[in-house]
Image: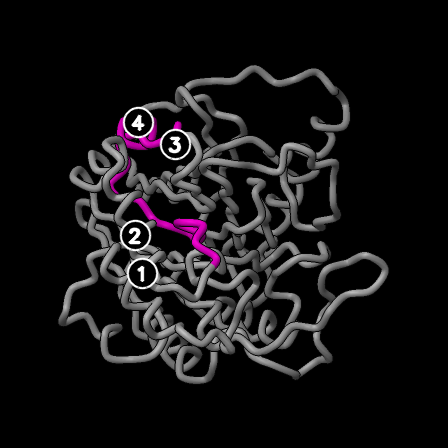
Amino acid sequence: MLRSTLYLRFLSVAVMAVVSCNESTAPKPLNKLPSSGENFRLSFGSCNNHLKPNLLWDDILQSEAQAFVWGGDIIYADTDDVTKIRRYYSELSALESYAQLAASMPISGTWDDHDYGLNDGGSEFSVKAQSKEALFEFLQVSADDPSRNREGVYQKQSLVHEEYSVDILHLDTRYFRSALTEGTNGKRYQPNPYGQGTILGEAQWQWLETQLKESTANLIIINSSIQVLSSEHPFEKWNNMPHERERLIALIDASVIPVVILSGDRHISEFSVMPPSLDRSFALLDFTSSGLTHAYSGFSGEPNPFRVNTVVSEVSFGILDVDFTNKLLTGYIVGDNAEVLESLQLEF
């Protein structure tokens, strides 16, 4: 009965949000990011070209976040020249505004294709092992971290807030990923035949399953460079391998600990929410934040059956507030000068 009640309550809130959006086309006023208060606050973002104006690091620094998470495309190297990849990371690290952020809070994350080195690249990339080392040097992953001794960049980060804890599981959607299926009629990709290919590779799948089963945290955050819930656009996404997406959602459904997904890649920011189900008592949020230095300003719409509220197609970063006492998640899509461009609140 409790899960059914939560499901109906979520549907009611979602319907109200849709009605509100449809009733008025007037731009909504922009508000400043509020203080974090007693909440655990996480900042995150993706799609950062250090050769473009980096306008948001001061806003992230002043956001009162406890940590910053990279969602991928930390740099735009697009090369198999690892010397250039390392140089770009060094140039980003040397930016005064980013250096101040790195000195003030822990920074972790994963990669996507442009920092990996190959646009839309996967397991075929010839220098992926060397590219991993360049990323880990940039992120200052400790020499004794278990991720140093295995293929790929997937790893766990644990953060503590008062008596509560958060596990962040950084996935690697590049190192092991099989070939994608080219699309037709102008679409970049279409889903692979069901059961064909892998995104994570079996070793990473086993690691993820173990982390979800054995975690003792109060909240688990899965950091995926590509979108999980949005399933109908023609670009990179988990639904390009539908069986892999189903496997991931099934693992999340089986978790006794609430899970949130962070994603990037798209040069748009949006909230996608899968309502609670008989197997999952919490609404599953896929919070996409992209990009930090450039965005899809010409965005004119695309289907996403899980979208709540409106798409933001200007430079922005994400803020996730966690109120453990009242079991509330609040997501903010934030632009320059700490302007809140969109927000969403969910129970967990």
Task: Tell me how far mark 3 sits from mark 2, CA to CA.
Answer: 17 Å
Q: Which residue is mark 2?
A: 87
SS at badge 4: helix
Residue 258: tell me if it is visible.
no
Residue 103: x %, y % from top left:
16, 40
Say whether marks 2 and 1 touch (CB < 8 Å): yes
Task: Tell me how far mark 4 sits from mark 2, CA to CA.
Answer: 23 Å
Q: Nearer the viewer, residue 133 or 243?
A: 133
Q: Residues within 10 Å of mark 2 (few under 14, many from 20)?
A: few
Residue 54 got which mark?
3
Q: Which residues are magenta?
A: 55-78
SS at badge 2: helix
Quadrant of image for the N terminus: bottom right
Residue 210: x %, y % from top left:
35, 78
Frontmost of labels 4 and 2 is 2
Q: Which residue is mark 1?
A: 83
Circle nearer the N terminus (3, 2):
3
Task: Tell me how far mark 3 sits from mark 1, CA to CA.
Answer: 23 Å
Q: Amino acid at mark 3?
A: Asn
Instruction: Give the residue displayed 31% in from the left and 24% down from the top.
Output: 35
